């Protein structure tokens, strides 16, 4: 930076600057050392001045057209807001109150000697004393950065805020942030209740969010900060439509709704969250009915959160009731390494996998050496999540081992869970198993997919009016009570689709010669809908669900769909086994 000063000031003035920094050379003092009214400096021609604070700097009128000024502090000596400035009577740079300052007594500018694209919130008047409202000063520091971004430093202290601090000025939709590459860096975020955080941002008034990063925006960093909601902030940290960014050593607590909220943007498509990293985060629910971590997106515009990594994080409901450590919704391909999703009270939940507003998601999440005290899966007949994977699922704190068939993996002691698909695959590779030969299937219970949505889109439709018959073979571990199947029509929706159930007997043709055990029909159904077929409870075992359809002469037909196969069922089209799955589920209880 000193080299830059030489190029700006010229060798002569730069020599005076260096002399002033070392305490040598002729200097002039404006005002008293700490108190008193500013005094008009007596010019000696040296062009070097010392002032006590910002007020004195604004009042200073150097006798020279170029000068060096050393300011001891923003308010008082040593408060972190001081620094060295050069004065240029001809300069007309935009005043930002910290790195470029317009003199009250001249038309010139005082320009701070500092690293390029770096600002300190104390240069803008933030005190960090736990008493002063520092909102405006912190926001001014962020706003002073150029379009390409830079670093905002928050030295150790407690910074009170009365409204949200905003990083990025996009709307997470059709307006991209005018700035990217912003680094918002504190001196340390602490860990829960055990240590005092070096840098704390403290909510002192009611607000929806404390700290907002909103884009579309990229290449940002937030680190070393404790966010204390104090029962006034609904959310501590909101991250909305961002990419390629890094968040670490952040602690959030005292929120009344959500600690850390991560959202994909709204339309147009492309405002998703991608290639972001999170390390050493902590979010702790101190109030009932709160959520430590929420990750979601905008399902309608296909803007989700994906290809993102979390490492060494803790999301904890602490002593609160009816709270959630982590809530996953419209997310895809997110990995967690050595993370803990903790609860203490039985009314709270470690993690929720929620597909209710986003069919096929969550999807492809992976948890490595993580522990999850408890969990829930939220699905209905129209909304189902895909599979999530666990490697070394922690059991050392009596965690609840997943039983849902979509939560698959191994415990930290090497015990597999929900690995029926693997067992069926291995059996098939060895030529079949059990008394059902080539048609062996694992016994499954609950709501069990008969197709694989991953990478297969909607699939292929089979027109039943043309005389086609589609059937699916399943192995019910408990009573077979029904199924949910995706139907469509080609015209006026006046078709009928019939579901007949047979006990499986050796092969397809032999089975159809047996007695029909149950039947249900979808009549005049709405196009592209899920039909819930209901059967009287049938005992455990192998069943063939056979689907036929008709429609009036003036209608093109009615259809079912097939797409990716799954090990839990076998699909037949016109009596021939096909390498596909019927788009739907069978249901047992």
Image (spheres, rainbow, N blue to C red):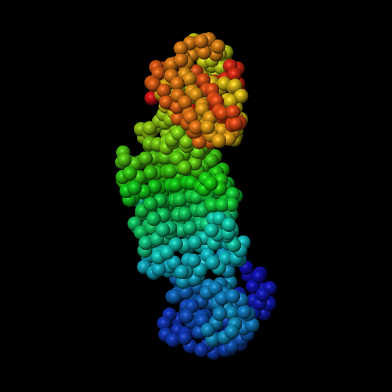
- Number of callouts: 0
In front: 339, or 558? Answer: 558
Q: Residue at x 62, y 61 (%)?
A: 148
| Residue at x-position 32% and y-position 46% | 320
- Estimate the x, y position of residue 311 in percent, counting from the top left: 49, 43
Would residue 16 be found to the left or right of residue 424 on screen? right
List x then y, in percent, for residue 516: 46, 15
* Quadrant in which the C terminus is drawn: top left
The residue at the point 49 percent across, 13 percent down is 504
Residue 476 left/right relative to 70 = left
- Residue 321 visible? The answer is yes
Question: In the rendered image of this protein, does residue 146 appear above or below residue 512?
Answer: below
Report the front residue among 483 and 25.
Answer: 483
**Residue closest to the far front:** 553
- Residue drawn 33% across the image and 50% down it: 286
Looking at this view, is 402 or 190 the one in front?
402
Q: Determine whether, in the image, residue 372 is placed left or right of residue 63.
A: left
Q: Nearer the viewer, residue 188 or 545?
A: 545
Of the 4 image quadrants, the one containing the N terminus is bottom right
User: Is residue 200 visible in this depiction of the protein?
Assistant: no
**Residue 243 image point, x, y percent:** 57, 51
Q: Position of residue 588 (x, y in %)?
A: 41, 24
């Amino acid at each position: 930076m000193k080299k830059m000063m030489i190029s700006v000031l010229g060798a002569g003035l730069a020599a005076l600057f260096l002399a002033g920094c070392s305490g040598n050379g002729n200097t002039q003092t404006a005002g008293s050392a700490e108190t008193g009214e500013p005094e008009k400096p007596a010019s000696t021609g040296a062009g070097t001045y010392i002032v006590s604070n910002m007020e004195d700097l604004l009042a200073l009128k150097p006798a020279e057209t170029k000068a060096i000024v050393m300011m001891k502090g923003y308010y008082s000596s040593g408060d972190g807001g001081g620094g060295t400035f050069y004065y240029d009577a001809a300069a007309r740079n935009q005043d930002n109150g910290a790195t470029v300052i317009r003199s009250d007594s001249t038309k010139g500018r005082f320009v701070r000697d500092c690293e390029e694209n770096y600002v300190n919130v104390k240069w803008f008047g933030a005190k960090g004393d736990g008493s002063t409202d520092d909102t405006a000063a912190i926001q001014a520091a962020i706003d002073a950065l150029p379009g390409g971004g830079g670093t905002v430093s928050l030295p150790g202290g407690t910074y009170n805020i009365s409204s949200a601090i905003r990083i990025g000025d996009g709307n997470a939709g059709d307006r991209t942030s005018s700035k990217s590459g912003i680094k918002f860096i504190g001196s340390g975020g602490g860990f829960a209740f055990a240590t005092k955080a070096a840098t704390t941002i403290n909510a002192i008034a009611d607000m929806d969010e404390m700290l907002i990063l909103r884009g579309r925006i990229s290449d940002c960093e937030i680190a070393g900060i404790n966010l204390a909601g104090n029962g006034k902030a609904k959310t501590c940290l909101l991250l909305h439509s961002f990419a390629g960014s890094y968040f670490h050593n952040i602690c959030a607590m005292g929120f009344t709704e959500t600690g850390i909220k991560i959202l994909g943007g709204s339309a147009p498509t492309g405002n998703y969250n991608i290639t972001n990293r999170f390390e050493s985060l902590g979010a702790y629910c101190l109030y009932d009915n709160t959520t430590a971590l929420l990750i979601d997106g905008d399902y309608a515009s296909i803007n989700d959160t994906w290809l993102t990594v979390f490492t060494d994080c803790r999301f904890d409901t602490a002593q609160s009731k009816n709270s959630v450590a982590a809530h996953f919704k419209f997310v895809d391909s997110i990995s967690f390494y050595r993370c803990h999703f903790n609860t203490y009270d039985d009314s709270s939940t470690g993690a929720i996998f929620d597909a209710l507003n986003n069919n096929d998601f969550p999807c492809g999440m992976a948890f490595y050496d993580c522990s999850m005290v408890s969990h829930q899966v939220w699905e209905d007949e129209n909304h189902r999540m895909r599979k999530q994977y666990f490697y070394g699922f922690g059991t050392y704190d009596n965690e609840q081992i997943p039983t849902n068939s979509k939560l698959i993996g191994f415990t930290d002691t090497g015990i597999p869970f929900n690995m029926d698909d693997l067992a069926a695959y291995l059996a098939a590779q060895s030529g079949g198993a059990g008394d059902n030969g080539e048609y062996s299937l694992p016994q499954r219970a609950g709501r069990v997919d008969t197709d694989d949505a991953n990478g297969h889109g909607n699939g292929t439709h089979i027109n039943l009016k043309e005389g086609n018959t589609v059937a699916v073979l399943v192995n019910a571990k408990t009573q077979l009570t029904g199924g949910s199947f995706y139907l469509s029509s080609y015209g006026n929706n006046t078709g009928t689709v019939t579901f007949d159930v047979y006990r499986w007997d050796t092969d397809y043709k032999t089975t159809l010669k047996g007695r029909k055990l149950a039947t249900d029909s979808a009549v005049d159904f709405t196009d592209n809908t899920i039909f819930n077929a209901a059967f009287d409870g049938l005992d455990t075992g192998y069943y063939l669900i056979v689907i036929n359809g008709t429609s009036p002469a003036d209608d093109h037909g009615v259809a079912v769909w097939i797409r990716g196969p799954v090990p839990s069922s076998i699909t037949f089209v016109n009596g021939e086994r096909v390498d596909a799955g019927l788009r739907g589920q069978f249901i047992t209880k």
